Amino acid sequence: MKQNTFLKIFFGLLVFTMVSYSIAGYSIRRAKIENPGVVSTVAKHYNMQYQDDGNNISFTTLNDQGNYVKSQKTWDLDGAQTKIKIATKSADVFIEKSPDEKFHFIAEGMLRSENSPPDLFEMKVEKNEVEIKETRTKETKLHIQVPKSAQEFSFKSVSGNLEAHQIAGKEFEVATVSGDAHLAEISVKELGIVTVSGDLQITSKIPSDIQIGSTSGNVKIQTAEAAQTDIKLKTVSGQITNPFKTSSKSNRKIEVTTVSGAIEIL
């Protein structure tokens, strides 16, 4: 009895859907006859593609088809700036030491072909600061080479990943929602990282102070100086792995707090 009722409901919905599509197709064709440009105008407004082969009508979101044009941009700065701020939504960023005394930026990704800023990133340069923001892009990567003059770094992202190698300076701040961060051979006085679910990995010497806060992201710190470092690890339900004894007399400090993320010191 229940099976018969289910079949009746299923076929009823199927017939209703087919009738609805037929009515919608008829309405679109009538609108096209009355005003030939109205359908294409509506499709363009909602960033969709309209197809009518006489038998079938379809609207496809252009984003799903990849209406992004490949773009690449390279630009340099003289190296007078001491602070660099990066803000992205989903772009992955790689930062490393510059081979000279200049900033070098290489950006590549997919840029919307219509109604989009002309560049993958917006750059604002002030006297001692460089600020970079991601525009409406997709599958974007930014490679930055920084000179010794750069002393302060700030990276904020929703889901973009960060890799930083051989960076020295005063301060490095990282804030992500779900993006991962991997820092290797970092030599800064202060390192602060905040994330919701992104995983963090640090492979380098320990600076004067490391402070990390995470909700569910895992934290892994690998350093040869762990035994000579003041380490404080706190978690609500995450697992802690730390084979080293803490040294409260050390000038180097590691403080990690998570809710459910695992903490591992190697």
Image (cartoon, rainbow, N blue to C red):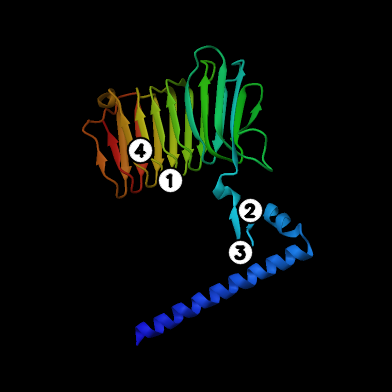
How far from the left and from the top, in percent, is residue 201?
36, 33
- The quadrant the N terminus occupies is bottom left
Residue type at mark 3: give it. Asn
The residue identified by callout 2 is: 48
Mark 4: which secondary structure?
Answer: strand
Distance in Å between CA atoms under marks 2 and 3: 19 Å
Mark 4, residues whose alpha carbon is within 10 Å: few (<14), some, or many (≥20)?
A: some
Residue type at mark 4: give it. Val
The circle on residue 256 is: 4
Give the mark, 2 or 3, whose residue is nearer the N terminus.
2
Query: Which residue ends up furthest to the top in the rendered image?
Result: 100
How many marks the image carries: the answer is 4
Query: Which residue ends up furthest to the front in the rendered image?
Result: 54
Mark 1, residues whose alpha carbon is within 10 Å: few (<14), some, or many (≥20)?
A: many
The circle on residue 26 is: none
Depth check, mark 2 against mark 1: the one in front is 2
Distance in Å between CA atoms under marks 4 and 3: 62 Å
At x 70%, y 65%, the residue is 29
Mark 3: which secondary structure?
Answer: loop
Give the mark, 4 or 1, whose residue is nearer the N terminus.
1
Distance in Å between CA atoms under marks 3 and 1: 49 Å
Give the mark, 2 or 1, whose residue is nearer the N terminus.
2
The residue identified by callout 3 is: 55
